[in-house]
Image (cartoon, rainbow, N blue to C red):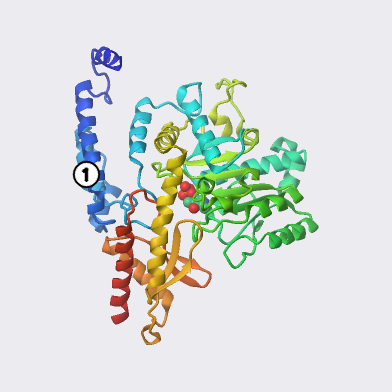
Amino acid sequence: MLREHASEATARPPIGPLAVPAGNLRDELVRTAHWVADYLESVATRPVVTPRTPSQRQRLLTSPLRNEGRPIAEFLDFVEAEVAPYPCGNGHPAFFGWINTPPAPVGIIAELLSVALNPSCGMGEHAAMDMEHGAVRALAELAGLPPGTGGVLTSGGSMANLLCLAAARTWYLRQRGVGDQTDGADYANAHARLVCYQTAETHMSVGEAAQTIGLPAGRLRNVPLTSDSRMDPVALRAAIRADIETGLLPFCVVSTVGTTATGAVDPIQEITAVCREFGSWHHADGAYGGLGAAHPDLAPHYAGIDQVDSLTVDPHKTLNVPIGCGSALVTDPTRLRDAFSLTASYLDVNEELPWMSDYTFELTRPAGRALTVWAVLHQLGRQGVSDLIDHYLRRTRLLRELVAEHRDLQLIADGPWSVTCFRYLPADPGLRPPDPDTFTAELGRRLQDGGRAFLATVRIRDTLALRASVCNYQTSDDDIRTLVNEVLTIGEQLTKS
Ligand SMILES: *Cc1c(COP(=O)(O)O)cnc(C)c1O
């Protein structure tokens, strides 16, 4: 049937400067598809990253725009020559930096299809928007949130945290009878007294979100951590009490379920209990670890996740959905709508079928998020999600074992999630570097430049550590061994020099 439509379409002559004759487009898509498949097959044999020369960079930074256009076939050649050889590294199975992942193959197909269809998941009533509702519901269910949870897919965890903080603010002020700015002085007065709680381990996007919603400076409190790098609920209660005594309004507590630095999970139930006591919103940032409830070993840390008010989950992390795809999941989605449903006369509002744009800051929104999440979740199924997390945890266990076994390696932090923080520190005190942090930073840099594996460094309390996160569906035990061998080889070289 599609073919019939296609042959009608080919009867239309190409019109205008963007048009491409149908046969020509088909050839280019096929050539690109072959290139993509070859590229993905060869990624593991390429360097993880390749440094660029200043002149290579200039060609991209300042390339002048010609007056005349060029054939579309040149674009693939350009990407092949100038972009593909200098990757971010996250497609490679020996990439352990930050929490950046490769694209799930079915996600690549879904992304291509989504841009061919190109609906906006902001307005109108169409299938892709229903897919987004469905994808949100599936994520919420995997995360252990209650039925009725809604929300939106976002560009990433940072945007999801921003949306949830904005929803928390609007909800909290509405509870006090001053939900929007038309409430004038009362709104301004209450807003000026808002205070929010996090920890030193909270992702910086929460601080940025707090600034963006206009939280007064200095009102993002760092609650002390217990010795296992988790928020101390006793200290949280004390901090809120002290703030209330001075007339402040504790509108929101942000916990982290899977911290970026060490993979720790804050005590969810205890934090919710404190929030209930003071009428605060509990936002859990699970950009990295939000799907922990889907794996049997992690699930015990997620008891009570169904009681949070909102949860951030990044499908572009744990699920290897192509970048940028996060999600803001809100157990009562009308609260998200209350914060974002200002409308305009040229937009029809259907109360029965609210548009996705009523739940977020964006109006014209890509369908790629919905199609990629849907595609990946349907390939995996519930069991596949658990197996994928299991794959990360097994490789992580091997890494920790190798670190524990070697006398010159020292484990510094290992959350329940798949992050391992460690350092090279010779067992022989006579060989120890005078400044271990400088040594670790140099080791990390050399490892990155070497191109065989990639990790980043992180400060854990007073120590600079190497940080390896396993979040790639293709990472094998051999890739873990490659990483450890690189660390040992470079560590020995640096010690001798
Ligand atoms: C990665 C991360 C974020 C930010 O998400 P982006 O998708 O990079 O915007 C927020 N919180 C935590 C805990 C993260 O690990």
Q: Quadrant of the N terminus?
A: top left
Pick the residue in front: 313 or 9.
313
Query: Which residue: 21% across, 31% down?
Result: 30
Residue 117 in the image: above or below residue 322: above
Query: Which residue: 28% across, 76% down?
Result: 493
Query: Which residue: 57% across, 65% down?
Result: 228
Can residue 448 be spotted in the picture? no
Query: Which residue: 49% across, 56% down?
Result: 417
Does 379 sit left or right of 255 as displayed?
A: left
Residue 243 coordinates in the image, percent (x, y): 75, 58
Q: Which residue is mark 1?
A: 80
For label 1, being within 8 Å of ligand 1 is answered no
Residue 351 coordinates in the image, percent (x, y): 62, 21
Q: Quadrant of residue 240?
A: bottom right
Does 137 sit left or right of 429 as displayed?
A: right
Q: Quadrant of the C terminus?
A: bottom left
Does 112 sit left or right of 249 as displayed?
A: left
Pick the residue in front: 489 or 12.
489
